[in-house]
């Protein structure tokens, strides 16, 4: 699992509330990604990071923000959750350094329900 | 130009049969094509990947066939087993810059015992 943890694993929240999801890696890899998975859409990139404080938007970034203040943590925030953001969220990393590879490794996911 | 089209959406195969899933891409700059397997409640896990300098790659019962001129690649699962029942995703990426993936929409495979 490339040392990736996501928290929380499940969350139910109400429309309009802020929500923060956390992705933590233990091996100081540079590239980290947030995806959402929805039936019929596969995995879609929300935001990604290529280093501390270096982030950029993916294809479905509206309504989401991210922060990366240290290498091991990549936070995804829904500023004001909407029902359309009900989804399963996955974090992924690309191994670098001595384990350099073009492969992305995924965390276990967070199931978010917005009522 | 950024889409990856995957088919079929779902597939039912008898035990011992061959499962075939197809993907097509548009962007000729893509140079890395992984396949992921996902079981319910789990994150996607890399199954096998190919680069465009080869036309085929085999790992055990899993084979990727790659057709660069047609911009298509496919996953073949030989001797399919009930334990192969999962959702499969193809993806495409450029191995430079941000290494972003574009995923297909997934294929739900069910192998009947």
Image: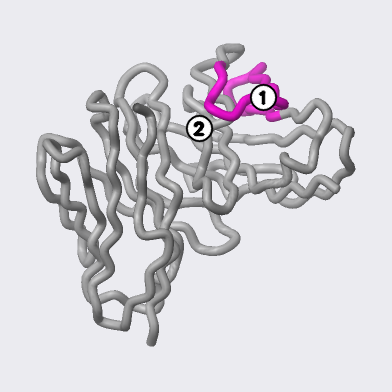
Q: Which residue is mark 2?
A: A27
Q: Residue at x 74, y 47 (%)?
A: A112
Q: Residue A83: x percent and y percent?
A: 78, 43
**Residue found 26% across the figure and 63% down from its top:** B20
Q: Distance from label 2 to label 1 (Cα)?
A: 30 Å
Viewed as shown, does residue A34 lie left or right of B85? right
Q: Which residue is mark 1?
A: A62
Relative horizontal placement of residue A102, taking residue B68 as reference (left or right) = right
Residues at marks 2 and 1, common chain?
yes
B100 or A60: nearer the viewer: A60
In what quadrant of the picture does the N terminus of chain B appear? top left
Q: Magenta part of the protein: which range?
A: A56-76
Q: Residues within 10 Å of mark 1 (few under 14, many from 20)?
A: few
Instruction: Please identify the quadrant where the C terminus of chain B is shown.
Output: bottom left
Magenta highlight: main SS: strand
State how the image is colored.
one colour
- Give coordinates of residue B70: x percent, y percent: 15, 40
Residue depicted at x 60% and y 60%:
B41
Percent from the top left, x then y, of residue A52? 58, 15
Q: Earlier in the sequence, mark 2 or mark 1?
A: 2
Relative to A14, residue A65 above or below: above
What crowding class fits label 2: few (fewer than 14 Cα within 10 Å), some (14-19), or many (20 or more)? some
Q: Chain of mark 1?
A: A
The subunit carrying tag 2 is A
């Amino acid at each position: 699992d490339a040392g990736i943890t996501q928290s929380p694993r499940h969350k139910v929240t109400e429309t309009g509330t802020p929500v923060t999801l956390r992705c933590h890696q233990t091996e100081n890899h540079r590239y980290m990604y947030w995806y959402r998975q929805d039936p019929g859409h596969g995995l879609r990139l929300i935001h990604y990071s290529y280093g501390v404080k270096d982030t950029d938007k993916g294809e479905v970034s509206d309504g989401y923000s991210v922060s990366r203040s240290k290498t091991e943590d990549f936070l995804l925030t829904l500023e004001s959750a909407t029902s359309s953001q009900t989804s399963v969220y996955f974090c992924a990393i690309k191994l670098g350094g001595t384990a350099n590879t073009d492969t992305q490794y995924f965390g276990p996911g967070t199931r978010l329900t917005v009522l | 130009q950024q889409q990856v089209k995957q088919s079929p959406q779902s597939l039912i195969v008898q035990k011992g049969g061959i499962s075939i899933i197809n993907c097509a891409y548009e962007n000729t700059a893509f140079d890395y094509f992984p396949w992921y397997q996902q079981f319910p409640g789990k994150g996607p896990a890399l199954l096998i990947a190919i680069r465009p300098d080869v036309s085929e790659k085999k790992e055990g019962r899993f084979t990727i066939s790659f057709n660069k001129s047609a911009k298509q690649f496919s996953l073949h699962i030989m001797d399919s087993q009930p334990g192969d029942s999962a959702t499969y995703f193809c993806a495409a990426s450029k191995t430079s810059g941000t290494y972003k993936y574009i995923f297909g929409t997934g294929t739900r495979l069910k192998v009947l015992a």
